[in-house]
Amino acid sequence: MIQPLAILCGALLLSFNSCAPKQATATTAEPQAPPTEETAQAPASKPLALGAEQLDRYLKHLEGKRVGMVVNQTSMIGNTHLVDTLISRGVEVTTIFAPEHGFRGEADAGAHIKDAKDTKTGLPIISLYGSNKKPSKAQMQHLDVLVFDIQDVGTRFYTYISTMHYAMEACAESGKSMLVLDRPNPNGHYVDGPVLEMEHKSFVGMHPIPIVHGLTVGELAEMINGEKWLEGERSCNLTVIKMENYDHTMAYNLPVRPSPNLPNAQAIALYPSICFFEGTNVSVGRGTPTPFQVIGSPFYQKKDFAFTPVSTPGATDPPHKGVKCYGMDLTDPSHAQPFTLKYLLEMYNNSSNKEKFFNNFFEKLAGTSELRKQVMAGKTETEIRASWEPELADYKVLRKNYLLYPDFE
């Protein structure tokens, strides 16, 4: 994932291309199916209701229980954090488990997150990033149920879903319950990219799913459980609190940035296509006002656009810090298209330093050793896509078994 205080972002309405979803806002979404002759005159659908907002449906699972919470700055019900909401309802919250970027979402991507204490509630905060990615047996002894409520962005390499996997695994091993409060997938309107080859499994890719997996966290949790992808082929006692009035054709503008370097809907839409550059010598704009909306390198040979990364909150030591990078400005909404390889191919083909373009992180992000070879061999995007299509087609069939909401096709 590569991603300052929980900052409320203004909802950006993007002009997506024809495969883009219909727009909806955080709590006043108007989900709309593509109009047909029968539905063209139908009244507007009801507003979107997030899993966390449906307290009457899940408080019964928490009554009289010791509750641990896997949450961060996105775990909000309106303007109130879920932790504060549950405590006000008399729930015995005992522990906060924080993913990458920490409980308040301020830390750099990959930064060491220290255990701490929440100043507002006094609750212990235990980091689930770095050496302790999974709640320990000792930590689980003091819990009865673990609640997961974090906003995802729908890509395999965004590490919140890896944290969810390990939380499920801890519940399975300790015989405790797992409650997932579902949230929309802002990239949930399509499926694309190579499926992970398990020899490349890592914290930025734990499951044999494509880069754009097209699932909500609740649907993915059901898939992890159902396919027995947890250690030892275990399954956990899982309950997913579904959203109401959600479907996979719906766009969702996040009210809180999910991590420091995904500040808006444009960055989130581009993220599947340009996160590859974290495994190259190309900057994705960390240390600029527009992270994941510009790309550039000192070695890119076209000079019509440039930026210089500097130290910023959430990117204190960005790649090419203080060095002018030449590349591409992707801030215009027209660039917020579905997953594509064109940016990767463009930057490689016009690099003056091809021998050092890739680093050893690239295969973990790609989930395959073939993509690097294909790019270096001069393959076109069409040729590369054909190579992963059989596995992607199989995944699409598997995915249908775990959908909790109407699909985009």
Image (cartoon, rainbow, N blue to C red):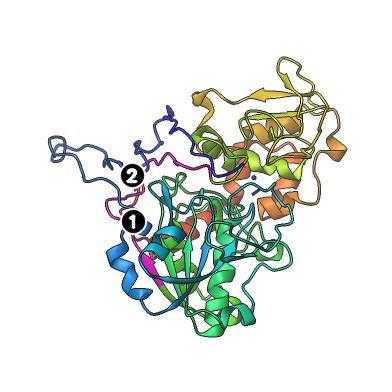
Question: In the image, what residue occupies the spot 35% across and 65% down?
Answer: 89
In what element is the residue under mark 2?
loop
Label number found at residue 53: 1
- Return the disc, 2 or 1, that comes first in the chain's sequence: 2
Say if mark 2 contacts mark 1, CB within 8 Å.
Answer: yes
* 3D distance between C-alphas at marks 2 and 1: 9 Å
Front residue of 150/4: it is 4
Question: In the image, what residue occupies the spot 42% across and 79% down?
Answer: 65
Front residue of 102/194: it is 102
Identify the main secondary structure in magenta. Answer: loop
Residue 245 is one of the magenta-drawn residues: yes
Identified by mark 1, the residue type is Glu
Where's residue 69, x and y in %? 51, 66
Residue 207 visible in the current orientation: no
Range covered by the magenta-colored residues: 239-257
Residue 158 is one of the magenta-drawn residues: no
Q: Is residue 128 above or below residue 24?
A: below
Where's residue 41, x and y in %? 12, 35
Q: Residues within 10 Å of mark 2 (few under 14, many from 20)?
A: some
Circle 2 sits on which residue? 27
